[in-house]
Amino acid sequence: MTTTIYDRFNRLVLTDTRWSAPVNIEGTIYLVFVDDCEFEKIANRDNAVMILAGDGQLIARWKQWWFESLDPDDLPETEVNGQNGISLIVIDKVNNEVIHDCGLKIAYKCVETSDLKAAFTGSGGKAAAESWIATQCSRTALTAAAEQDPFTSNIHKYVDFNSGKTNVKDPVYDYTCITDSIIHGGYIMTLNDKEILKLSESPLAETIKLAFASGDLAASAPSPSVTDTEWTPEKKESLRAAIREVRKLEGLDQ
């Protein structure tokens, strides 16, 4: 799964790096995953940033659209097999404002003004929020989430709006980057006891490889906000309006 943080108070976004796929083999639930894939959950432009969760193949299409098209009238698909498969948040880095949000979040607001201070999502979102409220430090919060949530890695990817610093790499849109990384350098975890083994050393390695090749197994950064989100016509129109704002921020339109 995943943990993502929009820390409006400190003007930055932060995510973990884990891509995973649960698999049931003869009644035992395993999680195959990778933490050092070059395929990022953050899509960063000069003046705007998008954070994504959900189905890996959908995210690949949305990232390619974000960097190569950004056409508000030609949005990528949002569903897999008739169900919503993606959640995203679009942030104006210049003004430090959310300009579109589709997906349930844990939001922490100022008591006096009701202004958003931070938002958290993903399987580790609750743990991250509890830590952030106590420390107001996103890095500490993501570490706390990783300690409590087996679906969140303790490797941090970030974009800092104040300094402009980031460790997000150049955009990668190829979904097979994720599956290849899992097959060749990933791990397998038995969820009932959290035992972890290199996938290459597991007797299930070939079964997992074939499942990815056939499409029976799909990598993702899943979050409760994905399945609980409905992309209504109103939400899609709201996103189109946000993308028009992004185009202005990026100097693509007047």
Image (spheres, rainbow, N blue to C red):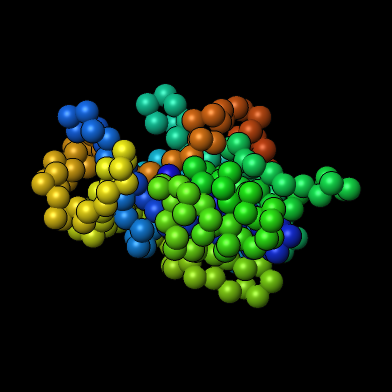
Residue furthest to the top: 82
| Residue at x 14%, y 50% (from the top left corner) | 202
Where does residue 63 sit, x and y in percent of width and height?
46, 52
Where does residue 220 sit, x and y in percent of width and height?
38, 44
Q: Quadrant of the N terminus?
A: top left
Q: Quadrant of the C terminus?
A: bottom right
Q: Quadrant of residue 230?
A: top right
| Residue at x 62%, y 54% (from the top left corner) | 131
Where does residue 122 sit, x and y in percent of width and height?
52, 44
**Total numbered labels:** 0
| Residue at x 74%, y 53% (from the top left corner) | 117
Left or right of residue 48, residue 115 in this image: right
| Residue at x 51%, y 46% (from the top left corner) | 124
Where does residue 112 sit, x and y in percent of width and height?
89, 48
Residue 64 shows in the view: no
- As displayed, is residue 16 above or below residue 223? below
Left or right of residue 81, residue 49 in this image: right
Residue 123 shows in the view: yes
Residue furthest to the right: 112
Q: Quadrant of residue 253?
A: bottom right
Left or right of residue 27, residue 47 in this image: right
Left or right of residue 210, residue 2 in this image: right
- As displayed, is residue 35 above or below residue 188? below
Observer-nearest of 79 and 197: 197
